[in-house]
Amino acid sequence: MIRDTKQMKRRVSVMVAAALVFGLGASADRTKSGHTGKPIRSKPIKDRRTWSVYGGGTDNIHYSTLKQITRKNVSQLQVAWTYDTGDAFTQSEMECNPIVVDGVLFGTSPKLRVIALDAATGKLKWAFDPNQGHRVVGKMRNRGVTYWDGGPEGHKRIFFAARQYLYALDAETGQPIPEFGEDGHIDLRRDLGRDPALQSISDTSPPVVYKDLLIVGSIVSESLPASPGDIRAYDLRTGKLRWSFHTMPHPGEFGYDTWPKDAWQYIGGVNNWMGMGLDEARGVVYAPTGSASFDFYGANRLGDDLFANCELALNAETGERIWHFQTVRHDIWDRDLPAPPALVTIKHNGRRVDALAQITKSGYVYVFDRDTGKPLFPVEYRKYPPSDIDGEVAADTQPLPTKPPPFARQLLTEDMLTTRTPQGHDAVLQRFKTVRSAGQFVPLSREGTIIFPGLDGGGEWGGPAFDPETGLLYVNSNEMAWLLRLGERQLSANARTGKELYMANCAGCHRPDLKGTPPEFPSLLNLAERLSEMEVEAMIRGGSNRMPGFPQLPYDDMRAIQRYVLYGENAAVASKPGAPSPIDLKYGIDGYNKFLDPDGYPAIQPPWGTLNAINLNTGEIVWKIPFGEYPELAQKGLRNTGSENYGGSIVTQNGLLFIAATVYDKKIHAFNKTTGELLWEAPLPAAGNATPALYEVNGKEYIAIACGGGKSKDPSGGSYVAFALPD
């Protein structure tokens, strides 16, 4: 950890002596609290009429007190305006939750242009293009922007990240702020303790503003090499680094002994890609983290790997750790915490408690005391089998909360396989009998292991909504099974042809046969018909979407991969291989494979997606409904199957739950928040895989959603649509 860019070293013995350990993986240091030590209780939310912050507020509860749209009139909603960014391209996406400030809606396009619209009419006020006229190749993701009111000077700013740069824009004009960093941006590859030229890093979730600090997470590669996931705070005005928290502890820092001796120098990941929550009264930022890279085989990072897969409470002023809780030890299943935490106030054991609710990909909700990190419901450490893969040492126990019950099914059994068609059932059953399916935290295998819920949840990055009046937490969930298989890979130090280099660096995502798993991991077959040599080189160097860049590759290696994927050439590389590296792992995966039937539908029985209401006061599920459907199956009478869904919901004080999110039916919906009854739905030009924004301008209430699609075979979109009641 450093403050004002200088290392603040503390002896491990002092940190351990000061820590209050609660067992069950939680550890707290009260001396680093962001407040004076006196009890602090959040004030009840009386007015939440704006949407000026990602997730509706720094507490991320997606809650609104606007009352113009009611259960009685919600069915009258109609399109108020539509704005087409003009940026849609093949399988592009829009995941942006727009914000609205002083009647202006700020969002991003599929090509990551920042746009400012009149929030009442959808008319463009200004746009900023970080691409500077260069063609965008591949998906680019952004989930929102951050607004700052400018402090005493009143110089209002918009912050957002594109590629490796974090930008500061004038909120009135969209022009970069010259005094911020270098001509309006800072390079996120710097200040990581590694050669900036060899890093591949960006940030897809909006930073958090605390006083004069901008607290920033990152997205890095999930394979190796990968950049470290340090959480950093920058001066809002100048862009100067103020503090950095090492999510992979350096020598002398708490947690260092949970890794191999030098792992912090070569392992990557352990990053906050999903966003953060901020308790301004306490001065505490709550940051979930993801797994260490490589996601599925950890022979070079044996140990529990703190602070991977953790809920972190950090002093927002200094970056010092207050407490942490590790939800997965030595993660080899890509069980990142997928969304920002919801900072909630609930009634627990007869008293009012400021708590934190964290959803997971595995379908569980952890509920922690916000001050101490102590779980409010008991957590059990359950034993799991060891790995039988050479070099791997899986953790022998993993924590699971006893309440609330999981909102997604946990174990895929033979009786749950699809019965949609007899032929489909037989094919799926034959495949199922050849692989392992034993529930959570069963190590991966060479024959194949079912991950259920899948790699995209359970819960996903849209996060939950919370109703402060009732204590209900609303979570949309995916119920897909994925099938992962480990296999020996060609070590990159010995890879000497284009195909060998491809197998070592690219096949884990794009598969050995180049077919990929579209749309997330596109096929590279016939790539020369779509991309030029220059564009492929730029993608290999700089990355795109979930694909990291490979700036560390020698030119000859990059060129050999480029020629192989474009033309099938398998040219030998003349340069001599280097010495074996600790990032050259013996095993990799053969692709990200969903478990599907021969027709491309989920291999399990519905529901394939659900919407859930969970009472955090009691730890019980109040209602659960299938969420989403496939239009072509609905036409044949197979309705309410549920489907994959991405993006979050909004809950209102006067009884509504708004959500789009469904991948295939491309609709936005309004439900009765008490019962789950559908009250209204409307078609969208493309799937709204994002969280809406609910706001008011000149006394009129609007709900706006980004419509980008990109997760199905349907054409992508690039528009914002706002709905309102008729005049």
Image (spheres, grey):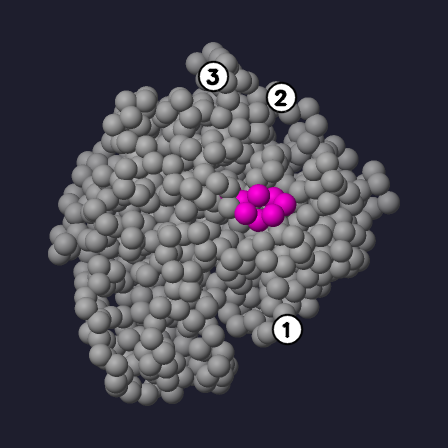
Looking at the picture, how far across and down is residue 86, in whole percent? 68, 68
Q: In the rendered image, is residue 264 in sight?
A: yes
Q: In the rendered view, would you say 57 is above or below 132? A: above
Which residue corresponds to the image point at 25% horizontal and 50% vertical from the top-left?
Answer: 263
Looking at the picture, how far across and down is residue 64, in whole percent? 67, 34
**Residue 237 belongs to the span the image colors magenta:** yes
Residue that sits furthest to the front in the current view = 6
Q: Helix, strand, or loop for circle 3?
A: loop
In this figure, which residue is indicated by the disc labeled 3? 37
> What residue did someone put label 2 on?
44
Q: For marks 2 and 3, give the CA distance.
A: 21 Å
Q: Quadrant of the N terminus?
A: top left
Counting from the top left corner in percent of width and height, residue 668 is at 63, 50
- Image height check: is 283 above or below 240? above
**Which region of the structure is painted magenta?**
233-240
| Helix, strand or loop status at disc 1 | loop
Q: Camera-side residue: 324 or 463?
A: 324
Between circles 2 and 1, the one closer to the viewer is 1
Residues 443 and 152: in front is: 152
Residue shown at 63% from the left, 70% from the top: 132
Residue 655 spot, x, y in % from top left? 65, 31
| Magenta stretch secondary structure, dominant | loop
Q: In the figure, is residue 133 to the left or right of 568?
A: right
Mark linked to residue 692: none
- Which dot, 2 or 3, sits closer to the camera? 3
Mark 2 residue crowding within 10 angstroms, few (<14) / some (14–19) / many (20+) = few
Disc 3 residue crowd, few under 14, some 14–19, many 20+, Cα 10 Å: few
Three-letter amino acid code at the position of disc 1:
Gly
| Residue type beneath disc 2 | Pro
Disc number placed over residue 133 in the picture, else none: 1
The amino acid pointed to by label 3 is: Gly
